Amino acid sequence: MLVISRKAGEKLRVGDSVTFTILSVSGDKVAVGIDAPREIAILRGELVETIESNRESSAQSLRAESMRGLAALIKEQKS
């Protein structure tokens, strides 16, 4: 991880098309402006974690449902 200190008003550029601007620093909060093309998704870290957790839960549910269906099919074929 790259760690960079910036003051309010200073900018940081990522690639050719994304610019972060430090808008203000107040105590333990930092306001950051992000200038990026619309096609680049910008999500808060906690939102990404929630999405990933939901995907994992959905995948586990789907696998469990598939296994129940397979077990029922095998049981049906044995009868």
Image: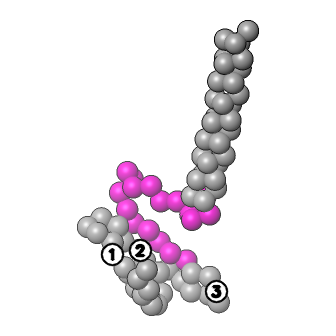
In x, y percent, where is residue 77? 66, 11
Q: Position of residue 8 (x, y in %)?
A: 48, 87
Pointer 1 residue: 13
**Residue at x 60% of width, y 59% of height:** 49
Kind of residue at disc 3: Asp
Label 2 sits on a secondary structure element that is strand
Residue 9 visible here: no
Residue 57 versus residue 22 in the image, above or below: above
What is the C-alpha distance between the residues marked 2 and 1? 6 Å
Question: Is residue 76 or residue 49 the one in the foreground?
Answer: 76
Amino acid type at circle 1 is Arg
Q: Amino acid at mark 2?
A: Phe
The image position of residue 14, as x and y in percent, is 33, 72
Residue 26 in which image quadrant: bottom right
Residue 27 in magenta?
no
Q: Which label number is shown at residue 28?
A: 3
Given contact means CB atoms under 8 Å apart, are the residues at marks 2 and 1 in contact? yes
Residues 7 and 72: in front is 72
Mark 3 and mark 2 lie on one chain; the one further toward the N terminus is 2
Query: Which numbered tag is attached to residue 20?
Result: 2
Q: Is residue 8 visible?
A: yes
Q: Residue at x 26, y 67 (%)?
A: 16
**Helix, strand or loop at disc 1?**
strand
User: Residue at position x 56%, y 86% from top?
Assistant: 25
Question: Split into 4 quadrants, where in the image is the C terminus?
Answer: top right
Categorize mark 2 by other alpha carbons within 10 Å: few (<14), some (14-19), many (20+). some
| Side of 74 relative to 38 (left or right) | right
Q: For the residue carrying disc 3, how many other residues have a C-alpha within 10 Å: few (<14), some (14-19), or many (20+)?
A: few
Q: Name the residue: 66% across, 46% down.
A: 57
The outermost residue toward the left is 16
Q: How is the image coloured?
A: one colour
Report the span colored magenta.
31-47
